[in-house]
Image: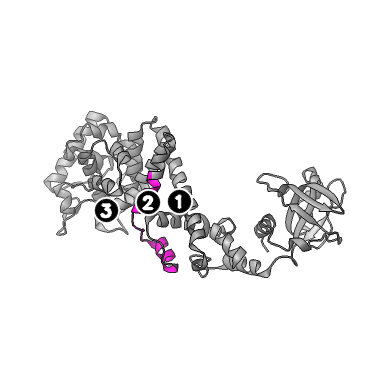
């Protein structure tokens, strides 16, 4: 038996509350289970319980075995003198407070439906990718989508907290913070960290001064990424190297990421950091007032159009410096653009809505998730194999949050789906 499960059962009254007696045979009327206590002291406060026609108001302490009271030294702690009921799964002894008063005990073992215990244990012992996978399709759509709404909001708030930190570090400069945030997601998970370091070491105002010159933007970004330190054979690479040396001296640039940080393995050549840097340079070169335009956009299609940029002719024919390829590159693909919108653009838009107290902007960010297609990767593919009613990025982002924050750590007792299955299956 898990004490967390007992807390849940007590809190939600998932036992035969009408047949509750103390271990001394006294009939209990449980008027209120109380409020969960997140701090030190008894598990629940402000409980209201009646026996022998006397109303008792105080705390409730919960243990698997009654003898755990003494194991945890509550009999020596004055904080537990206001406990009016000791709730246990298994009664094995009487317990006393530090003032020698006997604590009434309620044994839950004969009162809990066995199906709840069996299902919880099956979740905890499951080696499946999704512990409740066999029951997942049984959850009605209304309940499922209500929980997915909550999960997406939690995911947005987590990313919004990072945006808040960036705004603070950028002295509330929204464009600079947006540039760093967007650059981070240009790493597409595998290179997020070096992209963030690159953006922090290459201020937006430096890039803005050279935004009309794609060659100089590439020189600055590749140089700051420490990808121009090798000996090159082709003219374009050597020219970039010379241009970076000039810009580095002119602007007193100091790269804070090294070429060893960039990861090329386990990614398609079209996703190499060299390609992503060329795409970022092209985006800066071919866009103006990007953040303002994104905020004013009335549809996802408009935002997508802002990222359909043309990379330099060199990178159309190269994945790496000095290594030509027959397959022509065309800049950011549709899937990559959608990924940036999902992970960077919409969370930033949502947080700006928070900062500006603009509910319309927040609602627009959420609505745009529904315009974007359902993402396909390991996590979402598993969920979509369990049921077929997931259709857009709103769903996929919420499912990613579900897997990472609940399924991975078996937090079934805090999950809207897990709780529903425990109570109703």
**Residue 13 point in image, percent of width and height:** 69, 58
In percent of width and height, residue 114 lies at: 68, 69
Apparent side of residue 328 relative to residue 386 in the rendered image (left or right):
left
Relative to 354, does residue 342 appear above or below in the rendering?
below
Q: Secondary structure at mark 1?
A: helix
Q: Quadrant of the C terminus?
A: bottom right
Q: The residue tagged with tag 2: helix, strand or loop?
A: helix
Give the prevailing secondary structure in the magenta stretch.
Answer: helix
Tell me the tag on residue 369: 2
- Residue 98 position within the rendered picture, expressed as x and y whole percent measured from the top left: 84, 46
Instruction: Please identify, in this view, whether the residue under mark 2 or under mark 3 is nearer the observer.
Output: 2
Q: CA distance from mark 2 to mark 1?
A: 10 Å
Which residue appears at 14% of the width and 59% of the height?
326
Name the mark on residue 152. Answer: 1
Magenta-colored span: 364-386
Any magenta on residue 93? Answer: no
Residue 272 got which mark?
A: 3
| Label 2 vs 3, first from the N-terminus | 3
The mark closer to the camera, 3 or 1, is: 1
- N-terminal of the pair, mark 2 or mark 1, is 1
Q: Is residue 370 left or right of residue 420?
A: left
């Amino acid at each position: 038996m898990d004490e967390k499960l007992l807390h849940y059962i007590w809190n939600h009254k998932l036992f035969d509350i009408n047949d509750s007696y103390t271990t001394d045979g006294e009939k209990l009327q449980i008027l209120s289970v109380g409020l969960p206590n997140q701090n030190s002291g008894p598990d629940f406060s402000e409980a209201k319980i009646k026996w022998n026609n006397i109303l008792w108001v105080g705390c409730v302490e919960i243990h698997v075995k009654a003898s755990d009271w003494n194991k945890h030294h509550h009999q020596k702690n004055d904080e537990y003198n206001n406990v009016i009921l000791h709730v246990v799964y298994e009664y094995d002894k009487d317990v006393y407070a530090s003032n020698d008063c006997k604590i009434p005990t309620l044994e839950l073992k004969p009162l809990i439906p066995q199906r709840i215990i069996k299902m919880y244990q099956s979740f905890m012992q499951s080696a499946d990718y999704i512990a409740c996978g066999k029951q997942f399709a049984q959850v009605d759509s209304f309940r499922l989508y209500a929980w997915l709404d909550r999960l997406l909001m939690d995911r947005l708030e987590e990313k919004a907290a990072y945006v808040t930190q960036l705004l603070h570090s950028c002295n509330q400069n929204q464009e600079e913070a947006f540039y760093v945030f967007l650059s981070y997601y240009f790493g597409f998970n595998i290179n997020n960290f070096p992209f963030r370091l690159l953006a922090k070491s290459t201020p937006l105002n430096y890039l803005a001064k050279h935004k009309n010159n794609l060659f100089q933007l590439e020189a600055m970004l590749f140089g700051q990424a420490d990808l121009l330190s090798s000996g090159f054979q082709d003219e374009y690479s050597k020219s970039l190297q010379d241009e970076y040396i000039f810009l580095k001296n002119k602007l007193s640039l100091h790269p804070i990421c090294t070429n060893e940080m960039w990861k090329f393995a386990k990614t398609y050549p079209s996703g190499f950091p060299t390609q992503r840097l060329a795409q970022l340079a092209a985006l800066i070169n071919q866009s103006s007032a990007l953040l303002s335009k994104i905020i004013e956009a009335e549809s996802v299609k408009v935002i997508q159009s802002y990222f359909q940029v043309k990379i330099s002719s060199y990178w159309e024919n190269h994945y790496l410096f000095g290594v030509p390829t027959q397959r022509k590159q065309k800049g950011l693909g549709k899937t990559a653009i959608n990924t940036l919108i999902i992970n960077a653009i919409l969370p930033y838009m949502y947080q700006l809505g928070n900062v500006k107290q603009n509910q319309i902007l927040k609602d627009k960010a959420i609505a745009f998730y529904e315009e974007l297609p359902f993402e396909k990767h390991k996590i979402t593919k598993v969920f979509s194999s369990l049921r077929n009613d997931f259709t857009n990025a709103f769903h996929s982002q919420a499912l990613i949050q579900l897997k990472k924050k609940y399924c991975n750590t078996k937090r079934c007792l805090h999950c809207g789906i897990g709780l529903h299955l425990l109570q109703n299956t």
